[in-house]
Image (cartoon, helix red, strand yellow):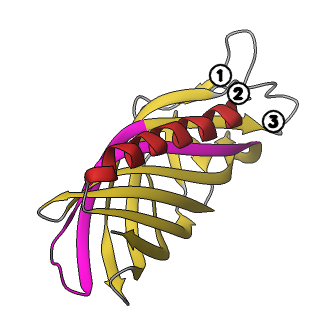
Amino acid sequence: MKKTFTIKSFIIVALLTITYSIQAQTVELTASYGYQFGSKSSYGYNNYVKFNDSDQFSLTIGVDMFQGIMTEVTYTHQSTEIINREGGATQRLMDLNADWIMVGASKYLTKDKLRPFLGAGVGMAIFNPNNEIRSVGSVDTKFYLAFSVKGGVNYMITEQLGINIQANLMVPIQWGGVYIGTGGSGVSGTSNILIGGFSGGLVYRLK
């Protein structure tokens, strides 16, 4: 149910963006696949909860507004697992589907075939745990305010088709840890998780 909600939310926002962009000069579609680095939140002495490295895919719908600025809606999906280190022992806690729905903007630095860009966005991170180990028990889906930054380059093969290469950093706000117990027990960190990675894909521009 939560997964359906995530996809429906992205579709609704994307359709609103396309509808608004009917009078705009260009709509840009970017589909990419890449690698997300792991990240961890520490607690106590040499203890931590960690997101393992994983792959990720994303879809971005952008509208060329003015002076090389693209307003964008981006959906990113990451399937990973969470591990815990405590008392010198490490164990897998659960699998995790992380979905990110971001609204933001990117600025192209040139209008040549090679187009470097910088961008940022704000939106929602949805963490949906599953396959939890028995000692952890059931963990609810969590929703967080999130922001992202990115930088990269598009190389336009033709006026409509290009190749995208970029790096990104995504941060869920006030992520304090992962609850792994029942009856009030749990594990919590003291810092936000920073999830960075890189990807490559295709760009298609509709005029």
Instruction: Say the numbered circle drawn on residue 180.
Output: 2
Q: How far apart are marks 2 and 3 (CA)?
A: 9 Å
What residue sits 68% from the left and 30% below the top?
Answer: 2
Neighbours of disc 1 within 10 Å: few (<14), some (14-19), many (20+): few
Magenta residues span 94-123
**Which corner quadrant of the image does residue 19 belong to?**
top left
Q: Give coordinates of residue 200: x percent, y percent.
A: 48, 76
Do the residues under discs 1 and 2 have CB atoms within 8 angstroms? yes
Residue tagged 3: 132
Q: Is residue 14 left or right of residue 68?
A: right
Q: Distance between the residues labelled 1 and 3?
A: 14 Å
What residue sits 43% from the left and 73% below the top?
Answer: 204
Q: Is residue 161 left or right of residue 107?
A: right
- Does dot 1 land on a helix, a strand or a loop? loop
Q: Label 1 sits on what residue type?
A: Gly
Q: Which of 77 and 129 is in front in this view?
A: 77
Q: Please identify the quadrant where the N terminus is shown.
A: top right
Neighbours of disc 2 within 10 Å: few (<14), some (14-19), many (20+): many
Query: Counting residues from the N terminus, which is met first, the one under dot 2 or under dot 3?
Result: 3
Q: Which of marks 2 and 3 is in front?
A: 3
Does the image show residue 45?
Answer: no
What residue sits 84% from the left and 28% below the top?
Answer: 135
**Which corner quadrant of the image does residue 5 belong to?**
top right
